[in-house]
Image (cartoon, grey):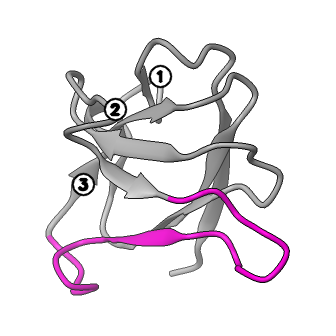
C-alpha cells in the first residue's frame, strides 16, 4: 500500500483546527512541521493548547523540521482518525505535512 501526502496550513494562530475536514482513518504515517513555519506547532485533541499539546518546534537553519509518528512509539495502530487530531500554531500561515496510509 502506498503513502499519501496531505498538507494542512492554519490561517489563524488562535484556534485549533482538525487535520482533516472529513473522516480519514489511517493505519500509520507521520506528522511533520512545515519547513517554512515561523513558529511552533501543537498537536492534540479538540482542546489542544500550547501547554497541553505535543510540540513540534519551528525549523531553523541547522535543524530539520520536527515530526511525530502516528502510532505508539512508531508502531502502527489499528487506525487513527485524522478528523480527531487537531493542530494549533503559534503563527497563522504555519502548518504540517502528513504522510499516511
Q: Is residue 26 magenta?
A: no
Residue 43, percent from left and from top: 35, 45
What residue does disc 1 label?
21
x and y percentages locating residue 93 in the rendered image: 75, 28
Distance between the alpha carbons at the discs numbered 3 and 1: 14 Å
Q: Relative to 72, is 86 on the left or the right?
A: right
The answer to whether residue 10 is above or below residue 87 is above
Residue 81 is drawn in which quadrant? top left
CA distance for labels 2 and 1: 6 Å
Q: Is residue 71 magenta?
A: yes
**Residue receiving disc 2:** 83
User: Magenta span covers which residues?
Assistant: 57-77
- Residue contact between numbered discs 2 and 1, judged by CB atoms under 8 Å: yes
Image location of residue 45, percent across then percent down: 21, 33
Place residue 69 in its image quadrant.
bottom left
Q: Residue at x 69, y 22 (%)?
A: 92
Q: Position of residue 52 (x, y in %)?
A: 19, 39
**What label sits on residue 80 in the rendered view?**
3
Disc 3 or 1, which lies upstream in sequence? 1
Judged from the image, the secondary structure of the residue bearing numbered disc 2 is helix
Amino acid at each position: 500500500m502506498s503513502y499519501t501526502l496531505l498538507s494542512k496550513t492554519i490561517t489563524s494562530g488562535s484556534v485549533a483546527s482538525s487535520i482533516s475536514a472529513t473522516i480519514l482513518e489511517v493505519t500509520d504515517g507521520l506528522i511533520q512541521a512545515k519547513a517554512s513555519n515561523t513558529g511552533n506547532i501543537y498537536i492534540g485533541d479538540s482542546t489542544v493548547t500550547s501547554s497541553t499539546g505535543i510540540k513540534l518546534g519551528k525549523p531553523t537553519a541547522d535543524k530539520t523540521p520536527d515530526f511525530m509518528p502516528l502510532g505508539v512509539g512508531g508502531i502502527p495502530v489499528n487506525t487513527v482518525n485524522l478528523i480527531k487530531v487537531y493542530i494549533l500554531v503559534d503563527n497563522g500561515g504555519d502548518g504540517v505535512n502528513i504522510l499516511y496510509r
